Image: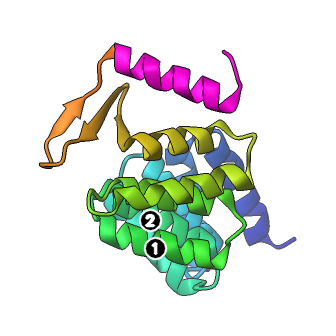
Amino acid sequence: MTDTDTSLARIRALVETRRWAEARQHLTSVLSAAPDSAAALCLLAQCELGLEQPEAARRAAAAASAAAPDDEWGHRLHALALSQLGRHDQAIAAATEAVRLAPDLPSSHWILGHALLGSPARAKEAYPVAQRVVALDPHDADGFVLLGLAAAGYEPVGMRFFTLRDDGSIAYLTAEAIAELDAAATQATGRKR
């Protein structure tokens, strides 16, 4: 194992524990020694996303995608950053590339689904994508959440939910409507809380 591999293993542990700033500091030295390391650039993008710096994350993810164009990870992170920047069409393109590169990876489809939900013009396309996420990993709750959001045309905003009306305006759901969605999801999945 090289020094870079050892450093990246430590940095991954920091990222997994959400110690974004500390991981980013360590990445500085790794990237100075290996500026085209796609893994280091992806970890940097994750740190920037964790630190709520989507533009910096976009730059790091774009560099990772350029360094390893056949690796889905950089494209997935690029899609996340672009979505956070409100650049939904570009996010959809990046997520679509991640799905092309890793068609059996649920997280690629999940990110594509969320990117589609972010685009009012293409939100309806999210439902079959969400179905694919659930098919690939039926034990992961995130896929079912995406499926419910796609089925209802809703996107979470903090702890509230909203739907886009036909005229493009936003309508927030009442607690009663959320309870109805929860009941429908429970019935559809056969799971009880």
Q: Quadrant of the N terminus?
A: bottom right
Residue 2 in the image: state x and y as whole percent.
82, 73
Q: Determine whether 107 is above or below 158 in the image.
A: below
Q: Earlier in the sequence, mark 1 or mark 2?
A: 2
- The amino acid at mark 1 is Ala
Q: Quadrant of the C terminus?
A: top right
Residue visible at 51% across and 85% down? 66
Element type where label 1 sits in the image: helix
Please give the name of the residue rendered at 67% of the width and 73% of the height, measured from the top-left corner: 102
Examine the image and state in which quarter residue 178 appears: top left
Q: Is residue 153 above or below residue 162?
A: below
Q: Main secondary structure of the magenta part?
A: helix
Disc 1 target residue: 94
**Which region of the structure is painted magenta?**
176-193
Residue 93 visible? The answer is: yes
Label 2: few (<14), some (14–19) or many (≥20) C-alpha neighbours in 10 Å: many
Q: Residue at x 36, y 64 (%)?
A: 82
Query: Label 2, on which residue?
Result: 79
| Disc 1 from disc 2: Cα separation | 5 Å
In contact (CB < 8 Å): disc 1 and disc 2: yes
183 magenta-colored: yes
Number of the label disc, if any, that sits on residue 10: none
Q: Is residue 167 magenta?
A: no
The percent position of residue 12, horizontal first and vertical second, equals: 69, 53
Please indicate whether residue 187 sits to the left or right of residue 155 in the image.
right
